[in-house]
Image (tube, grey):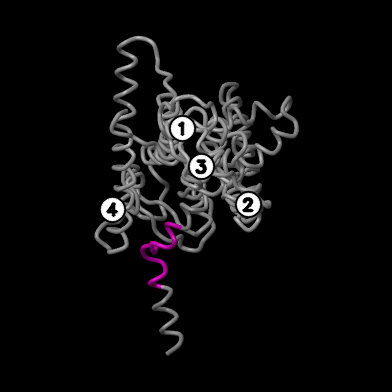
Amino acid sequence: MAENAAHITSATFTSVPSIFEVLAQESLMGSVRPALKHAVKVLAESRPEKFGCLLRWYDEIYTGLDFILQNYYLHKYNASFAENFYDLKRFVNGASPSKNLPRRALWKSLLCLVILPYLKQKLDHWFEEARHSYNIGQQPKGQVYKQLYKVFLAVYPYVHMSWEGSLLAYQVAYMLGKISWHSPLLHLSGTKLCHAEGEEEDVSHSLPFSQLWFSASLPGKLNLVTRKALSLTAVTLSTSLSVGVFFLQFLDWWYASENNAPSLMALPVPDPPETDKDLVKTPHNVCPLCLKLRTNDTTLSTSGFVFCYPCIYDYIRQHQCCPVTSYPSQQQHLIKLYPPDS
């Protein structure tokens, strides 16, 4: 009875991955990027002359290494690094999961695994920078560029919302068994996920390297050397990630905890409150920082005081606290106000 139950469980296990498995493999690679960036940031702050360029070009360097890693795993295991980590593999609809991915499906998978997420992250970064520049009154010169600038700021939030909504819709539909893809990127790649069948055979059957080397021409040898170097780089990256994945997740948690506002219990004893006589000196429409009439009214949600946006933004970025109450504050605590007379 137990053997039959085990057989049934095994047969079920080798079918379609559960929603928890596919989300776990996505979460794995999602935690690697910020954790590695935090490690690079620590190096850049300690030795800026040597490691500063790594932080400046981190996204491009990470994308290049990620491309090498994912290309290696797709050729060798028919899966990305994270999918292989959770014993998942890709296959084309109508083909056997044991067969190699077609070249077209492999390149589409690389596009969806590496290039499109990189472009999406860059768009998010550009939007945040453009929104900040717009809030402090900095706009590009030229009427055409200014119009495109405003259109981007107006349209991109809806594009981002549509993208996040499509991700949620795919996940819910996959969980209910309505579709075979848990994300639009997997659907776009033209592949599906299934459990690996247990064998650890190399799906890229090839002749021994020495035999290929002696039978190849000079251009062929250069191609072999390039492929071997990329393969060794991918193996090194794979081993490093496999060994350090839990450590990197810990760094990610540590990095996230550092960004959180400190506990109110850890605050120093505040100065005695000002008297009503002192408070009357500052009119209600004057910024407490620059002591001028406010522009771009912005309130700090941790204290309730209202400032000029450029004043409070720069102050929070430098001091991480309210300039009046010293309450710990971050940039996400800033709320733009739109009074009727503005």
Q: Secondary structure at mark 1?
A: loop
158 vs 48, left or right, is: left
Mark 2 vs 3, N-terminal side = 3
Q: CA distance from mark 3 to mark 4?
A: 26 Å
Q: Which residue is mark 4?
A: 169
For mark 2, does the 10 Å Cα neighbourhood hold few (<14), some (14 to 19), or many (20 or more) residues? Answer: few
Picture residue at 40% right of the left edge, 51% below the top: 90
Residue tagged 1: 283
Q: Residue furthest front?
A: 277
Q: Nearer the viewer, residue 14 or 153?
A: 153
Task: Please say if the residues under marks 2 and 3 sit with CB atoms less than 8 Å apart.
Answer: no
Residue 158 appears at what percent x and percent y? 29, 38
Residue 70, numbered circle? 3
Q: Tell me if residue 334 comes above or below residue 181 in the rendering.
A: above
Mark found first going from the N terminus, 3 or 4: 3
User: Quick check: 51 left or right of 34?
Assistant: right
Query: How many discs mark residues in the rendered view?
Result: 4
CA–CA distance between discs 3 and 1? Answer: 60 Å
Q: Nearer the viewer, residue 189 or 96?
A: 189
Label 3 or label 1, whichever lies nearer to me, is 1
Q: Which residue is mark 2?
A: 254
Number of other residues with Cα within 10 Å of mark 4, as a class: few under 14, some 14 to 19, many 20 or more: some
Considering depth in this image, is 220 or 293 the residue closer to the camera?
A: 293
What kind of residue is marked 2?
Trp
- Magenta segment: does it hold 176? no
| Lower position in the chain sequence, tag 3 or tag 1 | 3
Q: Earlier in the sequence, mark 2 or mark 1?
A: 2
Location of residue 227 in the rendering, given as x and y in whole percent from the top left corner: 58, 33
Residue 101 occupies quadrant: top left
**Which comes before the other along the chain, label 4 or label 2?**
4
In the image, residue 325 sits, relative to residue 17, either above or below, namely: above
